[in-house]
């Protein structure tokens, strides 16, 4: 074997109440990375497609290369690898674009090297790539992209990642307005401290969401999509946020929040039936404020990243 191609899905991080600790993977789209053997040591990013020439090729800045280098450092191996990245996800969208690239690269490289690591063990390497991409090594995109499903990061020190139950029929609609928001910028508007009152509200909702997933209680899931820590500050960066929220909830969504650091919004629903109504309702709001939007809908992806092809 001298080349492996892998795919990693888009993700919704935070899921409203779980800032930096909750995320889930979606089926609709993702990134693809091929890693090939190279006949001299060192990593080279050979090609990047679908980014309109915007992503860096330097191995210290490219999230695929940073992640693979972190893995090689841990292995203490000096090998030569070429990286070919195909972006399926828009940059700065809040759908876990940098995470999907890093995760696909790791899954491909790990297979090419004979799987020295189990899937879960690749997480810290992907987190290093996130740190380079946005200044914070958060795991709520990389963990669900790698493992699939709904994931809780119970703790970062040491890393304790828990897969949650995904209720049958839980559906996600993503609304991607046509502008970019860098995660670093979207994090910079947040406050360093949280009041006791808000901490109580937030913990109640995280617990409610987890319980709702396990009990397959869709109303509880909807009620728990409440965020008093990040959303109030980030909503100011996202035109029409509260209007879209009201519209999609009236159209049958269980709830709505910011996907990761935005500007994409996610709405959860029970089954597919209400999806088109949700999209139409959101579209009306975006039309009224003159903002273009792409809408996607997807079941929750329970598989996570996988190898597509090896040669
Ligand atoms: N938890 C991260 C944040 C996700 O909200 O900044 C970034 O996609």
Image (cartoon, grey):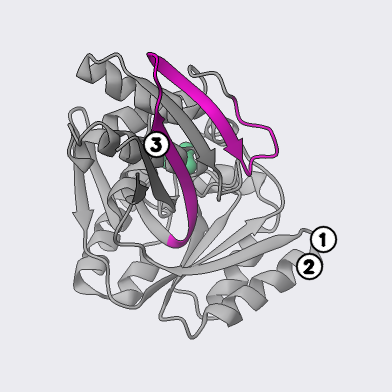
Q: Is residue 147 visible?
A: yes
> For this rendering, which residue is in front, 39 or 94?
39
Q: Residue at x 29, y 24 (%)?
A: 71
Q: Position of residue 10 (x, y in %)?
A: 46, 52
Q: Which residue is mark 3?
A: 105
* Residue 37 drawn in magenta: yes
- Does label 2 or label 3 sit earlier along the sequence? 3
How far is mark 1 from mark 2, CA to CA? Answer: 5 Å
User: Is 192 placed left or right of 156 in the picture?
Assistant: right
Q: Which residues are magenta?
A: 27-56
* Residue 105 drawn in magenta: no
Q: Residue at x 30, y 55 (%)?
A: 148
> For this rendering, which residue is in front, 194 or 1?
1
Please say if the residues under marks 1 and 2 sit with CB atoms less than 8 Å apart. Answer: yes
Badge 3 local density, few (<14 within 10 Å), some, or many (20+)? many
Q: What secondary structure is the magenta-colored segment mainly?
A: strand
- Rendered image quadrant of residue 54: top right
Q: Position of residue 52 (x, y in %)?
A: 70, 39
Q: Is residue 192 visible?
A: no
- Rendered image quadrant of residue 171: bottom left
- Judged from the image, the secondary structure of the residue bearing numbered disc 1 is loop
- Judged from the image, the secondary structure of the residue bearing numbered disc 3 is helix
How far is mark 1 from mark 3, CA to CA? Answer: 37 Å
Badge 1 local density, few (<14 within 10 Å), some, or many (20+)? few
Q: Which disc is residue 287 wearing?
A: 2
Q: Residue furthest bottom?
A: 273
Of labels 1 and 3, the one closer to you? 3
Of labels 2 and 3, the one closer to you? 3
Quadrant for the N terminus, please. top left
Q: Which disc is residue 290 wearing?
A: 1
Q: Residue at x 46, y 81 (%)?
A: 272
């Amino acid at each position: 074997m001298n080349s492996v191609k892998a795919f990693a899905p888009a993700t919704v991080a935070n899921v409203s109440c779980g800032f930096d600790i909750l995320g889930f993977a979606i089926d609709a789209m993702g990134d693809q990375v091929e890693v090939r053997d190279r006949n001299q040591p060192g990593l080279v990013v050979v090609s990047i497609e679908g980014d309109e020439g915007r992503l860096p090729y330097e191995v210290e800045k490219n999230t695929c290369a940073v992640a693979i280098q972190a893995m090689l450092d841990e292995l203490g191996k000096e090998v030569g690898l070429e990286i070919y990245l195909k972006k399926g996800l828009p940059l700065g969208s809040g759908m876990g674009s940098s995470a999907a690239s890093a995760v696909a690269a790791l899954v491909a490289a790990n297979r090419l090297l004979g799987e020295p690591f189990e899937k879960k063990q690749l997480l810290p390497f992907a987190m290093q790539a996130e740190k380079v991409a946005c200044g914070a090594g958060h795991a709520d995109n990389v963990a669900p992209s790698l493992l699939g499903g709904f994931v809780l990061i119970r703790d970062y020190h040491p890393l304790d990642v828990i897969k949650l139950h995904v209720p049958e029929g839980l559906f996600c609609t993503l609304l991607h307005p046509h502008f970019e928001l860098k995660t670093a910028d979207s994090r910079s508007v947040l406050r360093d401290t949280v009041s006791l009152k808000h901490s109580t509200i937030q913990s109640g909702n995280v617990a409610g969401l987890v319980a709702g997933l396990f009990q397959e209680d869709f109303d509880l899931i909807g009620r728990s999509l409440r965020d008093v820590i990040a959303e109030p500050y980030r909503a100011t960066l996202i035109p029409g946020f509260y209007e879209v929220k009201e519209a999609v909830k009236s159209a049958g969504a269980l709830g709505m929040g910011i996907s990761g650091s935005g500007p994409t919004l996610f709405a959860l629903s029970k089954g597919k039936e209400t999806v088109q109504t949700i999209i139409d309702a959101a579209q009306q709001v975006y039309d009224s404020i003159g903002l273009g939007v792409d809408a996607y809908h997807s079941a929750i992806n329970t598989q996570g990243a996988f190898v597509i092809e090896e040669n």
